[in-house]
Amino acid sequence: MAFVKACSLPSCDTPMDGNMQAFSLTPPAWTDKAIHAFEFCCPTCHQSSLEAEAAWINRRAPVYHDDYRRKWQEFYQCSCGTVWWAWSSDRPPSPLQVAEPLSEEG
């Protein structure tokens, strides 16, 4: 059985394919032309964020809700050419997320 050392993994700031720098502290140049999407998908072609060619999360400037939860701007570069952003709090639930069991009262 082979083991991979954690230090052999690429840095989060190093693009793996030249485009994906989601956790870089410096915004990629393509984010400059982003438009706000009010639904969590490309406002032009309605592709999901999961289908984006590139992504970047603005971790340096979180916004706080009234209940002290944080939200971030998430930027996406779509294959149709549109660059868009949306709030992380607007992201729909993941289909991989396990639903919480209903509590039984009584």
Image (tube, rainbow, N blue to C red):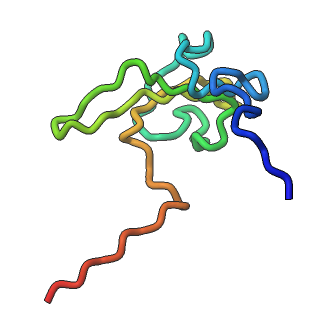
Can you say whether 2 is above or below 42 in the image? below
Give the residue at x 48% y 27%: 85
Q: Nearer the viewer, residue 49 or 37?
A: 49
Give the residue at x 39% y 33%: 87
52 left or right, relative to 92: right
Q: Quadrant of residue 80?
A: top right
Can you say whether 1 is above or below 91 in the image? below
Q: Nearer the viewer, residue 52 or 67?
A: 67
Can you say whether 93 is above or below 26 in the image? below
**Quadrant including the C terminus:** bottom left
24 left or right, relative to 11: left
**Quadrant including the N terminus:** bottom right
Q: Quadrant of residue 49?
A: top right
Return the x and y of residue 48 as percentages of the image width and height: 58, 44
Can you say whether 32 is above or below 74 in the image? above
Return the x and y of residue 76 as percentages of the image width and height: 58, 29
Q: How many marks?
A: 0
1 left or right, relative to 12: right
Q: Nearer the viewer, residue 5 or 102?
A: 5
Return the x and y of residue 39 as percentages of the image width and height: 43, 40
Q: Quadrant of residue 68?
A: top left
28 left or right, relative to 65: right
